[in-house]
Image (cartoon, grey):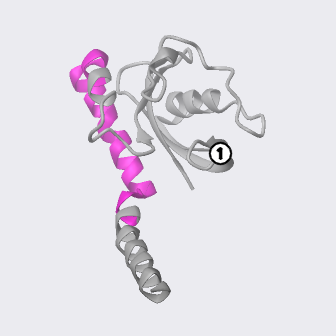
């Protein structure tokens, strides 16, 4: 009986592993989605993009979601906590005291796009973990689109 129970549990674990692997995203996928999201904002405008980025789907799934911030550090789109939209987060620091939002804005302004690394509390594990965010300036606008992922 115990052997059969063990086999059932082992089978259940084996069937869930591919699903977990399929849900994980790569840095290349995060970068590509960020670039695509910036194109949406540029082409369709912030209001339409906001609606698209705020619902489960191509731009919001699992731990992945699109953020949009202006160059003053004000969130324009923040799917995990929409109440934060319209608020300045320029002074936000990571676990090591780095001003990560300032770095995101600086990357968008000075380079147009690139990776920003920091350490942040992962809501899934409740632990401080390394995180990377791909940032892309919206062409012709003082807006940055970005998506982060835990390493």
Q: Main secondary structure of the magenta part?
A: helix
From the image, tell me which residue sits under label 1: 126
Relative vertical location of residue 133 with respect to residue 38 in this rendering, above or below: below
Relative to 66, 94 lies left or right: right
Relative vertical location of residue 47 with respect to residue 102 in this rendering, above or below: above
Q: Work out which residue is located at the far front of the displayed protein and give it.
A: 1
Residue at left 37%, top 53%? 29
Residue 65 highlighted magenta (yes or no):
no
Q: Which residues are magenta?
A: 21-49
Residue 47 percent location from the top left of the image: 28, 15
Q: Work out which residue is located at the far right of the displayed protein and give it.
A: 97
Residue 6 percent location from the top left of the image: 47, 82
Q: Nearer the viewer, residue 21 or 69?
A: 21
Residue 42 percent location from the top left of the image: 28, 25
Q: Nearer the viewer, residue 46 or 4?
A: 4
Residue 32 highlighted magenta (yes or no):
yes
Q: Nearer the viewer, residue 144 or 51?
A: 51
Relative vertical location of residue 53 with respect to residue 84 in this rendering, above or below: below
Q: Quadrant of residue 118?
A: top right
Q: Quadrant of residue 88?
A: top right
């Amino acid at each position: 009986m115990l052997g059969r129970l063990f086999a059932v549990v082992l089978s259940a674990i084996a069937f869930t592993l591919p699903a977990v692997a399929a849900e994980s995203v790569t840095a290349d996928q995060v970068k590509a989605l960020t670039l695509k999201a910036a194109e949406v904002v540029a082409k369709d405008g912030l209001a339409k993009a906001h609606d698209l980025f705020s619902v489960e789907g191509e731009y919001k799934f699992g731990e992945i979601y699109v953020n949009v911030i202006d160059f003053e550090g004000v969130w324009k789109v923040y799917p995990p906590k929409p109440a934060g939209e319209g608020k300045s987060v320029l002074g936000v620091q990571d676990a090591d005291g780095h001003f990560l939002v300032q770095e995101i804005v600086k990357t968008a302004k000075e380079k147009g796009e690139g990776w920003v690394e920091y350490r942040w509390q992962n809501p899934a594990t409740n632990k401080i973990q390394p995180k990377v965010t791909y940032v892309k300036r919206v062409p012709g606008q003082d807006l940055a689109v970005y998506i982060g992922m835990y390493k």
